[in-house]
Image (cartoon, grey):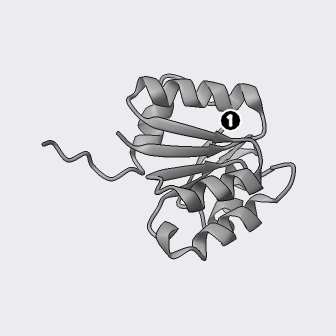
Amino acid sequence: MSLIIIIEDDAQSARLAMKILQRDGHHVMLASDGECGLTMAFGHQPDAILVDLGLPDLDGQTVVALMRQQASLAQVPILAFTAWPEAKAREMAHAYGCDGVITKPIDTRSFAAQVNTYLPPKVEP
């Protein structure tokens, strides 16, 4: 089971994303702002982090930069999770140091598969 942290200030978007990922077998932690998200990311070893680029307290660039400075998060995929237009989102995510982009509103049929492409392959016992 992968641990995924979602940093998203829109409660409805966060709950929907969490529900889909949990149904796919992942453990999900939600943070409603950048500070809380940083605390979660630094205190756990997530397998992926989804970050809204427009948070109420810290901008996405700051959140991603602080995570990238943390050695324990250096190899963790960080995905921009944003409602920005796709072309702009990809440009900003690349500039911020994100590994990928998932735009909102999400496609509920393909969202888990999108996230899974950034996770390490599951090792069967």
Where residue 14 appears, as percent x and y from the top left, is 67, 32
Asked if residue 54 lies left or right of residue 3, the reply is: right
Mark yes or no: residue 19 visible.
Answer: yes
Residue at 62% of width from left, 65% of height from top?
94
Secondary structure state at the residue bearing disc 1: loop
Residue that badge 1 annotates:
104
Residue 84 occupies quadrant = top right
Front-most of residues 110 and 65 = 65
Q: Quadrant of the N terminus?
A: top left
Residue at 48% of width from left, 22% of height from top?
109
Kind of residue at disc 1: Lys
Front-most of residues 33 and 10 = 33
Residue at 66% of width from left, 57% of height from top?
39
Which residue ends up furthest to the front in the rendered image? Answer: 43
Count the marks: how many?
Answer: 1
Residue 67 occupies quadrant = bottom right
Crowding near pointer 1: few (<14 within 10 Å), some, many (20+)? Answer: some
Asked if residue 113 lies left or right of residue 44, the reply is: left
Q: Quadrant of the C terminus?
A: top left
Which residue ends up furthest to the left in the rendered image? Answer: 125
Compared with 75, 18 (above or below) is above
Front-most of residues 61 and 3 = 3
Where residue 90 appears, as percent x and y from the top left, is 64, 56
Mark yes or no: residue 107 visible.
Answer: no
Where residue 79 appears, as percent x and y from the top left, is 57, 53
Compared with 66, 87 (above or below) is above
Where residue 70 appears, as percent x and y from the top left, is 57, 73
